[in-house]
Amino acid sequence: MPSFINKVKIFSGSASKYLAEKISRNYGQNLGTTTLSKFSDGEFQPSLDESVRGCDVFIVQSTMPPADNLMELLQLIDAAKRASAHKVVAVMPYFGLARQDRKDKPRVPISSKMVANILTAVGADRVMTMDLHAPQIQGFFDIPVDHLDSTVVFIPYIKNLQLDNLLLAAPDVGATKRVREFAKYLGAEMVICDKARKRANEIASMTVIGDVEGKDVVLIDDICDTANTLCKAAALIKEKGAKSVRAVCTHPVLSGNAYENLENSVLEEIALCDTIPLKAGNYKKIKVLSVDSLFSNAIRNVSEFGSISSLFNISDSYQKELI
């Protein structure tokens, strides 16, 4: 252990203050104070309201739409660098634009690579994020990336359900590797839902590869956007004779009619992380599991030169439900 460890300060952008406050509390200190000044034309300017000279600064901000969330994060990083912070870490529970990780048709950007370039250019020394849509995005960075894993949150939750005939399901082929990891920990079998799209957010057809009859099925995915895929997969699995269908999903993007889709679906429930705030409401099928412990421990280990991979040991201690 090095003899000198820089003082840690945790700040937040406006989009993730709800989570940053819990992370700071779990870490054992108060969240750093910031001010967001706004001009009449919509321009804004965030400021850090306390000294960060020589500190290791962790700035918590998910970068879901609108693009202002990303811009605010970049401005806060720049502010910390110009205020002589020792190191600045961008803590991005949800890494926006991660679905744009390749050219899937001519003349389109690789936006996740662009974001990586901008974060590095503005002065981030490190990035901490969770369940990237494409894990290879880590390779877009020339700075360290701590890629946290939601298995430590979801696996204890699934175990506590005590389902008699557990079967895991991938809602599309892209989720297969993620589901396979869960299956390994839980000692369960898995099936795959193969879908074809007409266009973004519109499914043309879907089939289930595997036997689901009489099973308690848990669908696993990283992003729940419109919830069309999850709800269609759940309905198809139920039609094929499943006893029950649930879902766990890391990032609750929940755009369009997602809330209504989930509440009206055949799902018994869906467990989501709090990487993105949910709209206020009384939702019967949505359960939120917090990632504050995981991120606070990751911040501690980074600041104290500890292991990040040790945080991925499956333990009930990471399970915390929000009612």
Image: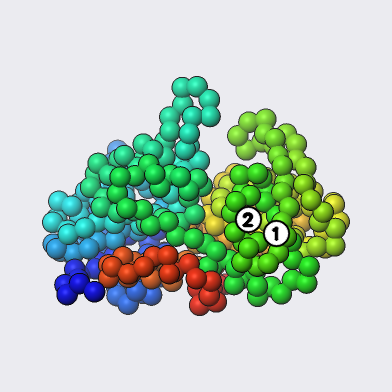
Examine the rendering and report whether any part of residue 69 can be seen.
yes
Look at the image and tell me whether residue 36 can be seen. Answer: no
Looking at the image, residue 2 sits to the left or right of residue 24; the answer is left
**What amino acid does circle 2 point to?**
Val
From the viewer's perspective, is 84 left or right of 232?
A: left
Q: Residues within 10 Å of mark 1 (few under 14, many from 20)?
A: many
Contact flag, marks 2 and 1 (Cβ < 8 Å): yes
Q: Quadrant of the N terminus?
A: bottom left
Q: Residue 168 bears which disc, if any?
A: 1
Q: Residue at x 40, y 47 (%)?
A: 138
Is residue 67 shown left or right of residue 58? right
Q: Is residue 4 or residue 225 the one in the foreground?
A: 4
Residue at image point 34% right, 74% down: 27
**Residue at left offset 67%, top offset 30%:** 198
Choose the circle earlier in sequence order: 2 or 1: 1
Q: Which residue is mark 2?
A: 179
- Spot occupied by residue 235 in the image (x, y as percentages of width and height): 78, 51
Instruction: Decide which of 103, 49 is in the foreground and name it.
Output: 103
| Residue type, numbered disc 1 | Leu
Q: Is residue 177 left or right of residue 305?
A: right
